[in-house]
Image (spheres, helix red, strand yellow):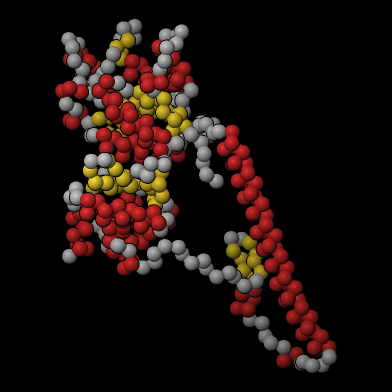
Amino acid sequence: MENKRKFSIFISSTYEDLKAERQALVGVALENNFIPVGMEQFHAAPTSQWNVITKMIDECDFYLLVIGGRYGSIDEEARISYTEKEYNYAKDKGLPVLVLIKEPTVIVESERDAGEDKYDKMQKLDKFRERVKNDKNTVDFFTDLNNLMYKASSTFSKAINYADDNAGWVRYRDIVDIINEEAEGRNKINAEVVEHQQNMLEDMKEMFSQFGSRLSELENNKLTWGEIPTVTNEDIDKLFRVENETLNIGKPKGDKPIIGQDDVGNIPVESAFLLVYAADGDGQIIKIQTLDAPTQIFTSGKQFMSDNSKRESARWVEALDRLIEWGWVKSLGYKGEIFELTGTGYKKADWLKEGMGIDTSKDPLDELKEFET
């Protein structure tokens, strides 16, 4: 049954220096079944701003902290920044806390605090960053906007796996759909059980009919005991089989054909590399599309395009399209930017890695040269 729960997540950060990052996180959150909440939703209210913030955090299922190069505005009463104050509140409430930290080495001067107290804020930021890293949170680091989207998608995807059973939001019509799906599933199972039992009865009828015919022939002296064919263990095994602790009677059904490619040699090397490297990473493939540049394909933080030409872009987009067509990869969300391996995809990746001898410890472009020469 499809999980139709959506999870609300409070996005906490300094604002002016991380506007683009916050906007990107809203899109990634929506693609991963999260409802983003943050200061963008603040509005005039009769209560104080802090009361509005705490009410929003109270109604969220997750809390996301993004740390850049600024400590931010300080609450004079608490003597800490509002961002750190929000973090403390979320921790006290017991919310699952996700953290994305911008690597300090890539932060430029314009992204840092300014003013007479900037050095004091820099010290407070360093102390806050270290505290968050060692505070039993889910923490990851990013270097730029594209890298942030990639890391955030992985963080959101993993967070759903340990969401509280009582967390999340479901629309009324979705609840009705779920109930109907469960009812249809039970009806289908019941129909399959009835069909299986009917087939068993038919097989048993045939068996007893044959046995009765043999007895009648004996009684009419048409056969002697020596002429009755001997039943072997193989004959019995064919008629009676135990599968998953269930007795099955009758001939086994033939194996279902496997959908997809079944020959290593028939799979284009680009599709094989994309699948294998994704399986050895976090299982996701990112497709970044912009108006002024060719589409780019990433997985596990690795770039697969040898140059930024449209020809090279088409080569790897086509490789991803094949994996989607074969059912080895599926799209997350509705934008077609984030994809993840299916169960079949992981199995095929293991098969391809062994069959082709792909060494994922090497850079994909270097390893790819071994197969193109």
Q: Nearer the viewer, residue 301 or 353?
A: 301
| Up/down of 140 relative to 231, above or below | above
Relative to 71, say whether 316 is above or below.
Answer: below
* Residue occupying image coordinates x 59% and y 64%: 243
Residue located 39% across and 66% down the image: 262
Query: 101 or 249: nearer the eye?
Result: 101
Asked whether the viewer can see residue 162, the reply is yes
Q: Is residue 139 visible?
A: no
x then y, percent, for residue 270: 28, 58
Residue positioned 36% across, 16% down in the render:
85
Q: Residue furthest top?
A: 77
- Quick one: quadrant of the C terminus? bottom left
Quadrant in the picture for residue 225: bottom right
Decide which of 130, 44 is in the foreground and name it.
44
Residue placed furthest toward the right: 220
User: Residue 202 sits in which quadrant?
Assistant: bottom right
Establish if 209 lies above or below 101: below
Instruction: Classify 52 as above or below 364.
Output: above
Across and down, in percent, residue 20 comes to 28, 28
Residue 26, percent from left and from top: 37, 31
- Is 137 situated left or right of 244 in this image? left
Residue lying farthest left? 109
Q: Position of residue 32 (x, y in %)?
A: 42, 38
Q: How many labels, in total?
A: 0
- Along the line of sight, which residue is nearer the eye, 176 or 192? 176
Asked whether, in this view, residue 280 is left or right of residue 49, the answer is left
Identified at 19% across, 48% down, the residue is 308
